[in-house]
Structures are given as structure tokens and as C-alpha cells.
């Protein structure tokens, strides 16, 4: 008897879940760049506390009592998960294909759809970073100078707003912004003002690999997200941030359940999840980068 989906429906469901979850991080970059927090069972709200005051060091004279103290206040940001659902009807012909083939095809499709939703949800938060760190101009190509400014702002955050960003800084840009950045860095074969050769150095390396060297620029880890689309002004919303600036709250991971109904020939797969994203920690630990999207 052939190893078909029909003969292994229950077993295949488990394999689909495992394969889909394993593929999701490969389909889109955002999930691995932010702070993930799982909500405890029964909770419908993720609370992210942070210090809302600053303490100061005193210089007492020997023998004097400390007569003043710093106020220690806490505030919080909350994220409410949103229910997501995905339903796929599989043709009856899939019942006769090898289980391994079906698991591979279906899990890849589900992973891409689910990863796109998560990525879109997270990148939509970029404009919500602290307004004091906004950089870039509408309808103007992304440039090294713009990224340099964003990096400097993140490293200059005042103590009252969380202090300078520590640890690895991430930057997520759209493909069109990446191409414009390449041009700004000198990755252009023939320029009207110079002879048609490629000088050694960055330009030569980037043309050879068509990638930002070592995936880092200015000490910032660079990522390209193909799901970032242009807005009504033909701009793209990009972001540079620390891991603690952007949070992803999960109440329920994607699951997969199978159903069969009499009016459809073939199984029906239904996936349900409950999650949402938001700006956590300090808003100025992220920088909203605006660039031309055409």
C-alpha cells in the first residue's frame, strides 16, 4: 500500500506543524530579531514594565546623613494578542501523493503565509518608534548618511529615555532601499564622471557578492525584508533598533488541525494562532527610517 496522506492523516498533521514552525524563520527575518514573550495560560495581555525615572549619585560629606533620595517609578507598555486564522482546502488528488511530498509542499506554503503575517505585523511598528529618532526623507533614496545618523541617535539616547542602546543594533530595509544604498556606496559599474572600472575595496566586494559585506554596515547588522511594501507616498518604512525595542507577544502558536466535510473532496487544514507585536521597553531604542520606495 502506498505511503499516502490519506493513510497517514493524523501522523502527517504532527509533521506539518513541526516542519512549518521550522521553516518560518527562513521565510522572513523579523521573528528572530525581536524580543519574544509567551503569555501565560489564561492571560490576554502582555505587560512590559520599564523604569520611568532616573536615579542620581550623591556626593555626601563624611559623617553627613543622606537626606534626599531618588524616586524609583515604573511604567508599562501592554500588547494585546490578536486572533489569526488560516484555512486551506487540499485537492482530493493530494490523497494519492507521497506523504513526504505533501508535507514538504504544504508546510512550505503555510510557513511562508504565516511568516509573512508576522513580518508585516512587526515591520508595521517601525513608525511607532520614538519620534525624536526619525530619520530619512520622503521620496529620497536611502543613503549611508541616513543610516549613520540613525546609528548615532540610538547611541546618544538620554538617560531619562533608557540611555544609549547597548548590544547589537539591527537594521531592516526593503530590497529597493538596499539597491539604492548599494548605489550610494559606489556599487555602480560605469559612472559618467569616472572610467568604467571597479575600484578595489567595498565596491569590488559588494559587486562580487551583491550583498552588504559580512551583513554588517557601520557595525550594524543588516537584514533585507522582501515583505516591506511602499505606502501611498511611494515610500518604504524601515527600522533600526535594538532587540528590546520591539516585542512579539504570543498567546498561542500556530497549530494545524484537519477536517473532512461531505461537500469537499479532500482534507481541509485549519491553522489558528493568537499574537501581536508592539514597541516595548524604551521607544527611543528604535529609529524609524523613511526612504523612497520606487
Image: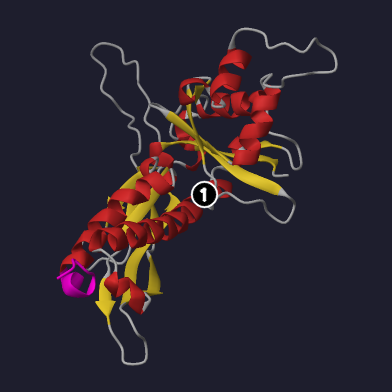
Horizontal and vertical percent for residue 146?
Answer: 65, 28
Tell me if residue 252 can be seen: no
Horizontal and vertical percent for residue 126?
Answer: 54, 46
Q: Which residues are magenta?
A: 1-10
Horizontal and vertical percent for residue 294?
Answer: 73, 44
Q: Is residue 3 left or right of residue 261?
A: left
Instruction: Indicate whether 270 appears above or below 70.
Output: below
The residue lying at 26 percent from left, 73 percent from top is: 257
Name the image quarter holding residue 83.
bottom left
Instruction: Indicate whether 124 appears above or below 198.
Output: below
**Badge 1 element:** helix
The residue lying at 58 percent from left, 48 percent from top is: 127
Out of 13 and 49, give the one closest to the viewer.
13
The residue lying at 33 percent from left, 59 percent from top is: 107
Horizontal and vertical percent for residue 288?
Answer: 59, 41
Tell me if residue 72 can be seen: yes
Color style of the picture: secondary structure
Instruction: Indicate whether 255 appears above or below 237.
Output: below
Task: Locate the N terminus by quadrant.
Answer: bottom left
Out of 214 and 166, give the one closest to the viewer.
214
Q: Give the class, few, some or many, for how many residues have Cα within 10 Å of label 1's Cα (few <14, many ≥20).
A: many
Q: Which residue is mark 1?
A: 123
Amino acid at each position: 500500500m502506498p505511503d499516502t496522506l490519506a493513510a497517514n492523516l493524523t501522523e502527517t498533521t504532527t509533521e506539518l506543524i513541526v516542519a512549518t514552525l521550522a521553516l518560518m524563520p527562513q521565510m522572513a527575518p523579523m521573528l528572530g530579531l525581536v524580543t519574544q514573550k509567551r503569555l501565560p495560560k489564561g492571560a490576554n495581555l502582555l505587560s512590559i514594565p520599564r523604569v520611568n525615572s532616573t536615579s542620581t549619585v550623591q556626593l555626601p560629606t563624611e559623617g553627613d546623613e543622606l537626606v534626599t533620595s531618588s524616586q524609583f517609578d515604573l511604567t508599562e507598555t501592554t500588547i494585546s494578542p490578536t486572533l489569526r486564522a488560516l484555512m486551506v482546502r487540499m485537492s482530493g488528488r493530494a490523497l494519492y501523493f507521497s506523504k513526504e511530498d505533501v508535507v514538504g509542499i504544504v508546510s512550505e506554503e503555510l510557513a511562508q503565509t504565516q511568516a509573512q503575517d508576522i513580518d508585516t505585523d512587526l515591520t508595521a511598528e517601525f513608525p511607532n518608534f520614538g519620534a525624536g529618532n526619525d530619520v530619512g526623507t520622503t521620496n529620497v533614496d536611502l543613503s549611508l548618511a541616513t543610516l549613520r545618523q540613525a546609528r548615532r541617535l540610538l547611541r546618544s539616547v538620554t538617560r531619562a529615555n533608557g540611555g544609549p542602546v547597548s548590544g547589537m543594533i539591527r537594521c531592516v530595509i526593503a530590497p529597493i532601499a538596499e539597491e539604492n544604498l548599494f548605489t550610494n556606496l559606489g556599487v555602480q559599474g560605469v559612472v559618467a564622471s569616472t572610467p568604467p572600472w571597479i575600484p578595489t575595496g567595498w565596491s569590488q566586494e559588494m559587486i562580487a557578492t551583491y550583498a552588504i559585506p559580512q551583513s554588517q554596515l557601520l557595525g550594524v547588522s543588516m537584514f533585507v525584508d522582501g515583505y516591506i511594501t511602499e505606502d501611498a507616498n511611494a515610500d518604504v518604512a524601515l527600522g533600526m533598533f535594538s532587540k528590546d525595542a520591539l516585542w512579539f507577544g504570543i498567546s498561542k502558536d500556530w497549530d494545524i488541525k484537519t477536517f473532512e466535510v461531505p461537500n469537499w473532496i479532500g482534507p481541509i487544514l485549519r491553522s489558528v494562532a493568537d499574537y501581536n507585536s508592539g514597541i516595548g521597553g524604551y521607544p527611543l531604542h528604535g529609529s524609524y527610517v523613511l526612504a523612497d520606495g520606487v
